[in-house]
Each structure stands twice: as C-alpha cells, then as structure tokens.
Amino acid sequence: MSEEEKKETAPVAEPAAAKAEQDAEKKPAAKKAAKKPAAKAGAEEKPAAAEAAPAEEQPKRQMTEAEAILAEGEMKPIVDDKKKKTRSIPAGIAFVRSTFNNTQVSITDARGGVIAWSTAGKAGFKGSRKCTAFAATMVAQDAARQAYTKGMHEVEVRIQGAGAGRESAVRAIQSAGIHVTLIKDCTPIPHNGCRPRKRRRV
C-alpha cells in the first residue's frame, strides 16, 4: 500500500476505536440509569413540589410564628421608660354613712373623687353584725389605711345617719394615723316634709 492509502485508512480506524470506548463508558451509565429510573423520577418530582409548596406556605408559616411570639408575650407594645408617678393627695374628705343595718366609709379628694372605700360586708361581717360599733371600727380602719398609702394625712369627716358606728368610725380614722380637721353631721332632717313611716309596735 502506498502512503496515501495508509493515511486514508488510519483516520477511519481511530474514530471507530474512540466510538467503541465511548459506547463502553455509556453502557454502565445507561445500566445505572435503567436500574434507578423510578427513584430519580420521584426524587426529581419531590423537589419541584417542595419548591412550589414553600412559596405558598411562607405567609402561613410567618403568621403562625407571629401568633406564637404573641402568645409567649415576647412582642410587647412600646412603652415609655418613664415610671408612672403615683398621685399623692395630702388632704381629703371622709364620708361615713352609719345606718341601722350597715356602715359605709368612703374617702375622697377635695373634688369628690373616691380614693378609698370600705363597707361592713367587705370587711367580712354578715347579718346583724354589720351594724355594730366594732364593724364600723374595722371598716374605717380599712378605708383609712388605703388612703394613707396614697399620701393622705388630713381629712374632714362628714357623718350621715344615726347608726351605732358613728363615733367609733371617727376614732378608727384617727388611730390609723390620719389627722381629723373637721367633723360635720350631714344627716338629713325633715322640716315637716314627707310623711314618716308608721311607728313600730314592740
């Protein structure tokens, strides 16, 4: 054979050998792909679904996290760091209503805003014990202590009614550490006004 014929045949042999090598490499890969077609298909489908799902579920997850944070109390409204100053009221008025069935004491500021109050029922008395002088003492002490903690040191006492706890209530207010500057009887007295109730027969 001449050199020209050798040159023509040699290039044809080399691509055939290269193709054989490429086929040999592709066959194992094709076998592996044939063994796991379903697994790969499922694995490829799941990520696609997983990628689509987070886009839809993201707002829901954020809402649930926000609700959880609110439930735990981590998110608190913005409040000024300044401490709330408690109002101190040095002087006020003590209203004592003493009836035949109960004793009520309310302590107010100069304008009439109630600061502290107490009754015989609130102090734990029931029935006929609510109208006793001891119940009036406990009621007045309870109301006076509440007012004393709020800075009250002077009161004007205004008494209404004719019950047994009139005097004992005033003494209890003084014993609680509040100075009584004035005692006034505000019991309403009719000057031939409404017809009174009939007298009891005992």
Image (tube, rainbow, N blue to C red):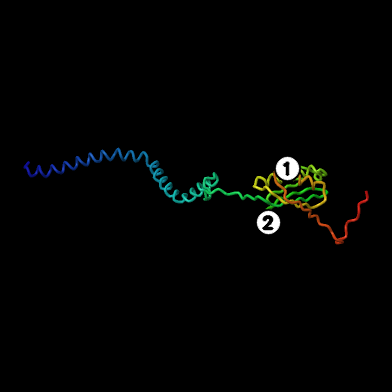
Residue on which disc 2 sits: 111
**SS for dot 2:** loop
Residue depicted at 19% across the width and 42% down the height: 16
Q: Nearer the viewer, residue 87 or 84?
A: 87
- Residue 102: image location, x then y, percent: 80, 48
Q: Report the disc number at residue 175.
A: 1
**SS for dot 1:** helix
Residue depicted at 90% across the width and 55% down the height: 198
Q: Nearer the viewer, residue 79 or 148?
A: 148
Q: Label 2 amino acid?
A: Arg
- Residue 33 appears in which quarter of the rendering? top left
Residue depicted at 81% across the width and 57% down the height: 188
Dot 2: within a 10 Å radius of its alpha carbon, few (fewer than 14), some, or many (20 or more) residues?
few
- Residue 165: image location, x then y, percent: 80, 46
Q: What is the C-alpha distance between the residues marked 2 and 1?
A: 25 Å
Q: Is residue 196 above or below residue 147?
A: below
